[in-house]
Amino acid sequence: MGCQEAHAGHNKNVKGRPTAATLREIYQELFHAFGPQHWWPGETPFEVIVGAILTQNTAWTNAAAAIENLKRERLLSPSALKQIPVGRLARLIRSSGYFNQKARRLKDFVRYLYGSYQGDLTRMRRVSLARLRNELLGISGIGPETADSILLYAFGKPVFVVDAYTRRVLARHSFISWDATYQEIQQLFMDRLPGNNSLFNEYHALVVALGKGFCRKTKPKCHTCPLRKVGRLCLETPAAAKPF
Ligand code: SF4
C-alpha cells in the first residue's frame, strides 16, 4: 500500500495504532533530544489561561507581547479584566491577532469565572476535570485544544493536549489518518499512558518542540530528526488535511 492509500482518510487504511511502548519510546527520544521544556511559560494560572486564549491561531511570541502589555498596565488579573472596556482590551492585545474576538473571549471567560466561581481560580481548580472541561467548552471560542491547555497547564489536571503538530507527526508515521479527530488522537494517548499531569505536560511541550524544529509543514527535517526510526514514514500530505 502506498502513502496515498494510507491517507485515504479511513482508519482501516492506517498501518497501525502506536502501542503504549511506542508512545513511551517517542517520549524518551524527544526528552533525550530536547530535555525538559518547563511549560507553560506563565507566572500564574490566570496568566496561563490568558496565554492559552491569546495564542490561538498565532505564534507564541505574538501572544507574549500582548501579555506584556497587559502586565505593564497592571491588567493581568480577573478583577482588572472584568472592569476594562472590551475596546481598550482589544487594543492592548492587538499583537496577538484576531484581537476583537480574543478580547471578547477573555471577557467571556472572566464573566464565567465570576458567574460560577466568584472570580476565584482556586475554587475553580477544585472541580472535577470532566465538569470543568464541559464548562470551558461552553464558552464561545474555546475549543478542545484551548480547554485542555487550560486544564493541564493552569490547573494541573491530567489531560493530554492535542494540536496540529501532534496530528502531523502521528499521521506522517502512519499511526493515524490525516482526518483523525481531536478526540481520537487524545484517546490514543490517554488510553495508553498513565494519567499523569507531569507526563502529559512534558509530552505535549516536546511535541511542539519537535514540530517547530523538525516536523514542519513543508520540508520536514527527517534525516536529523529524533523520531526518524519510529513507525513507517509517509510524508505526503493530502489536501484534505485540515486544522481542528
Ligand atoms: S520530521 Fe520526519 S522523522 Fe521527524 S517527526 Fe516529522 S515525519 Fe517524523
Image (spheres, rainbow, N blue to C red):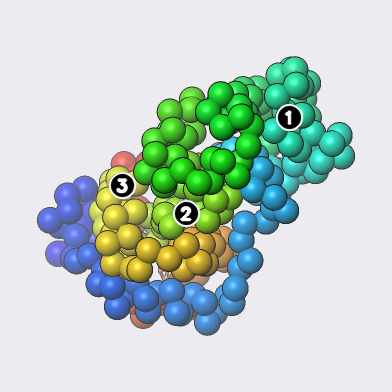
Task: Give residue 24's position: percent from left, percent from top.
Answer: 37, 76
For label 3, the residue is 183
The crowding category of the residue bearing disc 1, from other C-alpha atoms within 10 Å (few below 14, some 14 to 19, many at least 20), is few
Q: Position of residue 82 (x, y in %)?
A: 70, 24
Amino acid at dot 3: Gln
Question: Is 14 in front, or is 121?
Answer: 121
Query: Circle 3 — which element?
Result: helix
Residue 28 visible within the image? yes
Q: Which residue is mark 1?
A: 79
Q: Position of residue 23 (x, y in %)?
A: 34, 72
Q: Secondary structure at mark 2?
A: loop
Tag of residue 157: 2
Quadrant assignment for the C terminus: top left
Q: Is residue 37 left or right of residue 88?
A: left
Which residue is painted at 43% across and 65% down in the image?
196
- Identify which residue is drawn at 43% across, 28% down: 138
